[in-house]
Amino acid sequence: MPGGVDDRTAPSGGNTYDRRVCQELPGAGWTVREHAVAGSWPRPAAAARAELARTLAEPADGSVVLVDGLVACGVPEIVVPAARRLRLAVLVHLPLAEETGLDPAVAADLDARERSVLGAAAAVVATSEWAGRRLVAHHRLAADRVGVAAPGADIAPPASGTDGASRLLCVASVTPRKGQHLLVEALAAVSDLPWSCLCVGALHQDPDYAAGLRALAGKLGVGDRLRLAGPRHGADLDAGYATADLLVLPSYAETYGMVVTEALARGVPVLATDVGGVPQALGRAPDGTVPGILVPPGDPAALAAALRRWFGEPGLRRRLRAAAAARRAALDGWESTAGRLADVLEHLRRETRRAA
């Protein structure tokens, strides 16, 4: 796992996923040995590369080893040789080249490196059905080598909200891929409506973007109604969800979108971009209704139009809240995620035994 997996100042969906499956896999019959490898993944310095090489050299031949794709996919010169003697599974949270803002040459290099690693791995684990299909098609992988283990959710007390409409919540690291600038532009277009918006997420991953976001909010006249709160966790994060009327996620790319199910686990409807695995995360209530609104990515006008619908149509708000409450009751927990992941790992273990 990345060395910062437990860094509470920089929470991420990938870190949460890694931590929770480590906690839940023993319940699925696995003994877990954790290795957190510090480094600036996926492009680490020499010391981190050496530590990863030492870590992968420790297990005996044929051992089943699960590696976070952020650590594995940028260094095929280390991982591919290890994959020849280990039963290696790579967990892909986000394809490396799909990070927003990369120089095209850097993105192409990372993409090629990832293809080498995934091609050598005994198994690949994606975190949504969409991501699994994407990896198979893009990296030309055999479909039977790619498993899917979608994130789980912890059911929480239903959010009380504020007034049923006006408190908007965005939970995401403040980076270009998450698209908070689009949200600011959309909010400025509906400044006549009675909203307030709390943005929760790490601010240090791209300080220039965070500073530009504050400047944009001030320039467009909504700086006093939008708060960049930095990262929150535990009771502080719960409090943010408890007072939310609507979760807004304007991302350019998401393999799943764990904050969507975090909101639904509290009965909070969602306004999000129709990207990647977000439709799977949003899902449907048992009666088929969708507990949110999806809009095209990169389109602040579409976000603004959806917000006008949210505020202007009380019947829509009632339907979305009812659908979110029903979806809440049907969400899978993290034990289901661990069970699906355990199935992939058990297949590798059986293959090792047959070879022996």
Image (cartoon, grey):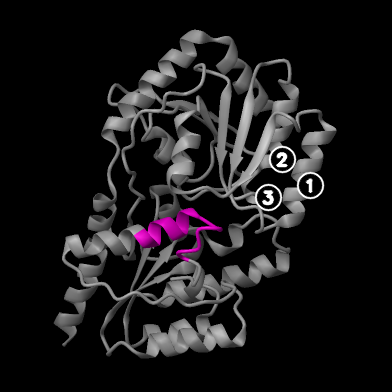
Q: Secondary structure at mark 3?
A: helix
Amino acid type of disc 1? Answer: Gly
Q: How crowded is the residue under tag 1: few (<14 C-alpha within 10 Å), some, or many (20+)?
A: few
> Counting residues from the N terminus, which is met first, the one under dot 1 or under dot 2?
2
Amino acid type of disc 2? Answer: His
> Counting residues from the N terminus, which is met first, the one under dot 2 or under dot 3?
3
Could you say where residue 325 lies in the image, as x and y percent from the top left? Answer: 34, 25
Q: Is residue 210 left or right of residue 131?
A: right
Q: Secondary structure at mark 2?
A: helix
Amino acid type of disc 3? Answer: Pro
Residue at image position (45%, 60%) is: 15
Question: Which of the numbered marks, if any, corresponds to residue 181?
Answer: 2
Q: What stretch of residues is rendered in magenta? A: 5-19
Q: Give the foreground label among 1 and 2.
A: 1
Q: Are marks 2 and 3 in contact (CB under 8 Å)?
A: yes
CA distance for labels 1 and 2: 9 Å
Work out whether 190 lies above or below 54. Answer: above
Q: Secondary structure at mark 1?
A: helix
Question: Which of the numbered marks, if any, corresponds to residue 176?
Answer: 3
| Residue that numbered label 1 is attached to | 212
Q: Is residue 203 magenta?
A: no
Q: Are marks 1 and 2 in contact (CB under 8 Å)?
A: yes
